[in-house]
Image (spheres, rainbow, N blue to C red):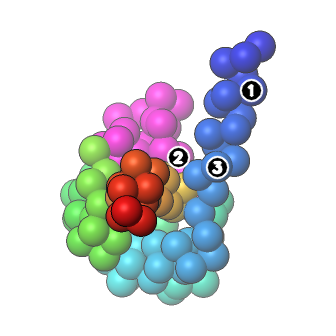
Amino acid sequence: MRKELQSAWRRRAAVATRETMSTVAQVVSAQLGVDKSKVTGCSTFSALGADSLDVVSTVVALEEQFEVDLPDAVDIELPDMGTARLKTMQDLADLIQSRFDAATKTPSHAVAMSSW
């Protein structure tokens, strides 16, 4: 039961902001040549007409845009939608948000030491 609660908390804690989702939609739209309005939280790469090369180039563009590493993103709809860890644009935006938050977080001990 505790694992389930922890998993639910982690999913909630990493929910992408509107700004993050909007930037993801903008980058995905530009990379795939689709209208930004078609890139929603529920969209999948395959529904947007992307092949595996499109996915890789889009992930690289997102890494550059957000200045984060997305090694987990290799599991986006590849090789099978049923086993993919990241199935939708919302999943991808949430991952980016969690990586971005982790990269910008200042360790608490550093804050305490800086006040000396």
View extreme (top): residue: 1
Report the front residue among 24 and 57: 24
User: Is any part of residue 37 visible from this angle?
Assistant: yes
Q: Earlier in the sequence, mark 2 or mark 1?
A: 1
Mark 2 lies on a secondary structure that is loop
Q: CA distance from mark 2 to mark 1?
A: 22 Å
Q: Earlier in the sequence, mark 3 or mark 1?
A: 1
Query: What predominant SS class does the magenta segment belong to?
Result: loop
Residue at the spot of label 2? 87
Residue found at x 35% / y 42%: 72
Q: CA distance from mark 3 to mark 1?
A: 12 Å
In the rendered structure, which amino acid carries the disc numbered 3?
Ala
Residue at the spot of label 3? 13
Is 11 covered by the magenta stretch?
no
Q: Quadrant of the N terminus?
A: top right
Instruction: Give how far across and how far down residue 43 sits, in percent.
Output: 58, 62
Mark 1 lies on a secondary structure that is helix
Q: Which residues are magenta?
A: 72-92
